[in-house]
Image (cartoon, coloured by chain):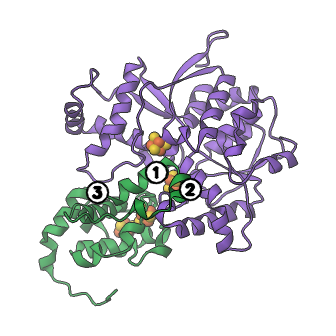
Amino acid sequence: MMGNENKPMKLIYYPGCTLKNQARNFDVSTVSSMAELDVEVEELARWNCCGTVHALSSDNIMNRVAPVTNLIRVKEAQASEFMTTCAMCYNTLKRANIEVKKRADVLETINDFLSLEETKYAGDVDVLHLLEYLRDRIGFDKLAEKVKKPLEGLRVACYYGCLLVRPKEVAFDDTENPTIMENLITALGATPVPFPMKTECCGAYHTVDKPEIIAERTDKIMGSANEEQADLVVVSCPLCAFNLDFRQDDARRLNPDFHHLPVLYFTQLMALAFGCDDSALRFDLHHIDPQPTLAARGLA
Amino acid sequence: MNTTLHISSARLGDPFVAQIEKISGQNLLACYQCGKCSAGCPMAAHMDVLPNQVIRLAQLGMREQLLAARSIWICVSCLTCNSRCPKDIKIAEIFEALRQTVLRGGNRADHLEIRELTPEARGALPPIAMISALRKQTS
Ligand code: SF4
Ligand code: SF4
Ligand code: SF4
Ligand code: SF4
């Protein structure tokens, strides 16, 4: 369902807090590249933090309130679906949604707790990740038509981490060997490399108080991308990005043979290929500067 | 840890076992100890008790050993084990139930002290890291 010639499609967008802080490069590249695809992205009004992690304990209803409040805001925006790009937001919002659709008692408790809200949640909103939106609603073939600067010669390792593919009920691709990002970057003209570590966990929040674990993970994951002669790694999660990019110095201390590689969001590669200007890329927010690598491929 | 276990059937009906099963929503006895969860666990190298051993100790109601294990704070809920277990056991949920048992214990057993981080570290860390670490490790 592409928009008709002169009227862009509208899509409600949930950015999440990290995209308004350290990961502004993810936010601006999303909005700019969607405009190139004639999709008008409208930021959800009054969104709140989703809570970042789905509580795995069956009796913790409190942690489901934050995601459900966002689903209410989507209804209040007269929409029945919305899109997010952060893998953690996606996972948390989607899991809460699946759960309240399945467990009427949990939904009732949450609606009771939110009794001051004018809108009740009834399981009537769908959570979409941008990658599945691009594949299923735009189509990678249509997306390829918008490419102004093909990313020729650029070797890309696509990193999924955990939350786009696990658990199965939230995954929009194969859980062990997803290929949706490879298909996207192929449409942009780049070359995906084989990447055996693509769904291996980066250590997530251990970055706060156990950075030595992240150093070990970053060394293994980025080392595998380097073995495949990748120019860079793309991700869909600001926590993966922080760990794999900003913890590279720690990985280097652990392993003197560690080779630095830039880490980009898949939306930055889209913005680059669609010819968006530098303000849509925000390479100043990276630890390892992607510009020399891109310049070597004639892309910066 | 001490490798000698004194096993008795009395522990199987232990309230601790029932509590872990209730919070996690899992049937502990479904596990037949194939070890697949531990084989694929990205955190195994940093653990003192491996995931399959955690399940075994939980089946047997070894409360003290489990609640003192470093492993329960090392597991990051990546769900690799869950997606590969041939018995569809949600191992990550069992780890969560163990963390929750410690955190709900009444004596503020938080496993993360934000005040111990330097202001520079706190300033550099993105909200996604801080919020998830706090949600997982504090009550
Ligand atoms: S998961 Fe992270 S980025 Fe997403 S809303 Fe929550 S804190 Fe923000
Ligand atoms: S790879 Fe790390 S940060 Fe990314 S989704 Fe997995 S645990 Fe989270
Ligand atoms: S993979 Fe499942 S059945 Fe096998 S040891 Fe782990 S929990 Fe038990
Ligand atoms: S969820 Fe925990 S135990 Fe399971 S594989 Fe991941 S880190 Fe290991």
The first of marks 2 and 1 along the sequence is: 1
For this orientation, the residue located farthest to the top is A6
Residue A78 against residue A114 in the figure, above or below:
above
> In the rendered picture, chain B carries what hue?
green
Name the mark nearer the viewer: 3 or 1: 3
Is B135 in front, or is B34? B135
Secondary element at tag 1: loop
Give the CA separation, mark 2 to mark 3: 30 Å
- Answer with left or right where residue A66 lies relative to residue A59: right
User: Horizontal and vertical percent for residue A73?
Assistant: 38, 25
Query: Residue at horizontal 57%, vertical 26%?
Result: A137
The quadrant in which residue A120 appears is top left
At 80% from the left and 29% from the top, the residue drawn is: A148
- The answer to whether residue B33 shows anywhere in this view is no
**Quadrant, the C terminus of chain B:** bottom left
Q: Are marks 2 and 3 in contact (CB under 8 Å)?
A: no
> What chain is tagged by disc 3?
B
Q: Quadrant of the N terminus of chain B?
A: bottom left
Specify the quarter for ligand 3: bottom left
Give the percent coordinates (x, y) of residue A281: 71, 37
Between A208 and A173, the one nearer to me in the picture: A208
The label shown at residue A166 is: 1
What residue sits right under mark 2 in the picture?
Answer: A199
Find chain A in the image and tell me its colour.
purple
Query: For residue A228, what is the image quadrant?
Result: bottom right
Q: Which residue is mark 3?
A: B139
Say if mark 2 contacts mark 1, CB within 8 Å: yes
